[in-house]
């Protein structure tokens, strides 16, 4: 028997419509590329999203067409989120940190019809314009006064595009399974692959994000996503904030400690979200300038593991609760968040820390298990580690245009490529990417654990651990270090510091110092490049 409940489709346009109606005077504050801070409200954002939707319609953009953005976190980018997806077209957020050849590849692969871009990226697009096969026009997100001299064919001024339209529009209704946005994974090997999100998956993900045990976003909050809107939809915040009427602060391109602090302070931000490297810059700024964070109650850290030293700095020194989070573009992206349980209320901080460094508990809606190489499920005892498998209504079915082939097993499980443990309380901990784990004497060593302990040393700015081949043990860990500014610390001192904090046989066999560790376009340590760099490295005592 079918229910007698209404089958209204879950559509992204309803988010901005709701925010305009019930939180119409709540502000969206953006640091603009042109310089000044821009302020307006959800009501205005809604009006302008409708004007944009009409402008797109006038250009013949319709259901399923791809419209790309190459843009920072800002109000015009937000208008694209709603104007494009609202009419059933697909918002393709391009990561500007990709190599130019990769941007050309994905714009052509996605068959983007329009690209909306910032002033910052005009030179980048000029250099590749003749290779963009499907692009009909490039819309520069600025006003007439700031329009640059450009060789771009068909450059259009964003504000002029909007000014030609009124906001007399009812959002169209269509199937909630319609594609809404597209984001390519950075592709450490091979070409990037497109993850195609939908209206239904995005709406379910946004509801989950707002719940207390996930991000706990509400109309009481002011949220500043440092995580870019071109990276997995700013972890869903660009949708979740209007859903709950939270004030939104968008930092533009200035992500250094000073500029992020300025917005956190002036706008009285209560919750923020970003990758560890961004927080490292902020913490350094706070320490150097003796500033505090009186308004902020929590911060979300994900994308890479949050080191214990960073969690302690936020919580002990600044009274900001860290919500450690794990996910991936293929999961819209939230999979787990690390919030404590009621029964832990009486725990001392030292008892809580072992949980806080974990990536957290599965969000309702994400099924999760760990398996061995033969596909057998492993116990949830916090000790056994295996391949982390997920499934759920906001987990991908496969990549755009079938790239990468079949990605699910018979039970619909998607292999995350991560290796993890699950403990009896349900907390998941990532030990490594499957391809980065160090295989020593038939056992696995977690490179992430070693990195996290090493960066706890105040004279270590960044640490990466890779496996180096060894005649006896197969592989042994090499610790690669970027020293903190002004430090001349030696390898032995770092290893002494690590002693007692990790199992004896995990101790790196050698320490190498570099000026810089390579990163991917999403800010993760690029282990492939590092392995190439140290391909000929011989560990002490390993010469045959
Ligand atoms: P995002 O960086 O938005 O999570 P990506 O698709 O770029 O999405 O990367 C996903 C991968 O990043 C995961 O499979 C995992 O290896 C790594 N990752 C994400 N969050 C964490 C975390 N908190 N700790 C360790 N690794 C993480």
Image (spheres, rainbow, N blue to C red):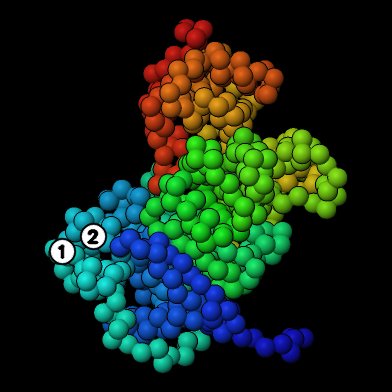
Q: Can residue 183 be seen in this view?
A: no
Label 2 CB-ligand 1 distance < 8 A: no
Label 1 CB-ligand 1 distance < 8 A: no
- Point out residue 14 in the picture as x, y percentages from the top left corner: 55, 81
Q: Residue furthest front?
A: 290
Badge 1: residue crowd in 10 Å (few <14, some 14–19, many ≥20): few
- Point out residue 508 in the picture as x, y percentages from the top left corner: 56, 19
Q: In this view, does 258 lie to the left or right of 393?
A: left
Residue at image position (44%, 71%) is: 39
Residue at image position (67%, 62%) is: 216
Q: Which mark is residue 363?
A: none
Quarter that holds the N terminus: bottom right
Q: In this view, does 316 lie to the left or right of 418?
A: right
Q: Give above or below for 262 relative to 29.
A: above
- Point out residue 48 in the picture as x, y percentages from the top left corner: 40, 80
Q: Which residue matches tag 1?
A: 150
Q: Is residue 350 visible?
A: yes
CB contact under 8 Å: marks 2 and 1: yes
Q: Give above or below for 394 relative to 465.
A: below
Q: Give above or below for 236 relative to 353.
A: below
Q: Nearer the viewer, residue 139 or 362?
A: 139
Residue at image position (46%, 21%) is: 487
Q: Residue 122 carries which label?
A: 2
Indicate the quadrant where residue 509 lies: top right
- Point out residue 11 in the picture as x, y percentages from the top left corner: 54, 79
Q: In this view, does 71 lie to the left or right of 325?
A: left
Q: Give above or below for 172 relative to 340.
A: below
Q: Which element carries disc 2, helix, strand or loop?
A: helix
Q: Nearer the viewer, residue 135 or 479?
A: 479
Specify which label sits upstream in the sequence, 2 or 1. 2
Residue at image position (56%, 15%) is: 493
């Amino acid at each position: 028997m079918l229910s007698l409940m209404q089958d209204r489709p879950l559509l992204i346009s309803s988010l901005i419509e709701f925010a305009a109606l019930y939180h119409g005077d709540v502000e969206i504050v953006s640091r603009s590329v042109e310089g000044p801070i821009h302020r307006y409200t959800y009501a205005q954002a809604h009006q302008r999203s409708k004007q944009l939707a009409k402008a797109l319609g006038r250009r013949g953009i319709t259901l399923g067409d791809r419209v790309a953005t190459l843009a920072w976190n800002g109000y015009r980018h937000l208008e694209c989120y709603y104007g494009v997806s609202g009419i059933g077209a697909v918002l393709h957020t391009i990561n500007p940190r990709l190599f130019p050849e990769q941007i050309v590849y994905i714009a052509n692969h996605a068959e983007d019809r329009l690209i909306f871009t910032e002033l910052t990226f005009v030179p980048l697009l000029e250099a590749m314009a003749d290779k963009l096969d499907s692009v009909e026009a490039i819309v520069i997100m600025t006003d007439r006064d700031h329009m640059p001299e450009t060789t771009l064919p068909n450059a259009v001024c964003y504000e002029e595009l909007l000014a030609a339209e009124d906001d007399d529009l009812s959002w169209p209704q269509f199937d909630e399974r319609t594609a809404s946005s597209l984001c390519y994974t950075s592709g450490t090997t091979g070409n990037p692959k497109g993850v195609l999100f939908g209206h239904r998956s995005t709406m379910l993900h946004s509801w989950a994000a707002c719940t207390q045990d996930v991000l706990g976003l509400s109309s009481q909050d002011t949220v500043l996503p440092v995580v870019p809107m071109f990276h997995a939809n700013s972890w869903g915040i660009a949708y979740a904030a209007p859903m709950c009427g939270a004030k939104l602060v968008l930092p533009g391109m200035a992500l250094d400690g000073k500029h992020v602090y300025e917005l956190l302070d002036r706008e009285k931000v209560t919750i923020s979200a970003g990758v560890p490297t961004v927080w490292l810059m902020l913490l350094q700024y706070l320490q150097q300038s003796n500033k505090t964070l009186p308004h902020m109650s929590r911060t979300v850290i994900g994308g890479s593991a949050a080191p214990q030293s960073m969690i302690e700095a936020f919580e002990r020194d600044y009274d900001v609760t860290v919500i450690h989070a794990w996910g991936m573009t293929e999961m819209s992206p939230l999979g787990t968040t690390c919030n404590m349980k009621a029964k832990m209320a009486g725990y001392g901080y030292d008892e809580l820390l072992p949980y806080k460094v974990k990536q957290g508990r599965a969000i309702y809606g994400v099924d999760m298990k760990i398996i061995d190489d033969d596909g057998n499920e492993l116990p949830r005892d916090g000790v056994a580690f295996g391949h982390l498998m997920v499934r759920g209504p906001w987990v991908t079915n496969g990549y755009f245009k079938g790239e990468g082939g079949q990605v699910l097993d018979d039970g619909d499980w998607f292999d995350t490529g991560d290796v993890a443990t699950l403990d009896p309380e349900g907390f998941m901990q990532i030990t490594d990417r499957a391809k980065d784990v160090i295989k020593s004497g038939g056992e696995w060593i977690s490179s992430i654990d070693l990195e996290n302990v090493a960066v706890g040393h105040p004279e270590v700015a960044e640490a990466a651990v890779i496996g180096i081949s060894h005649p006896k043990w197969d592989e042994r860990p090499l610790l690669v270090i970027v020293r903190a500014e002004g430090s001349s610390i030696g390898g032995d001192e770092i290893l002494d510091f690590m002693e007692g904090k990790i199992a004896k046989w995990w101790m790196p066999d050698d320490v190498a110092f570099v000026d810089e560790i390579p990163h991917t376009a999403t800010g993760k340590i690029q282990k492939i490049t590092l392995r190439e760099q140290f391909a000929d490295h011989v560990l002490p005592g390993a010469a045959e």
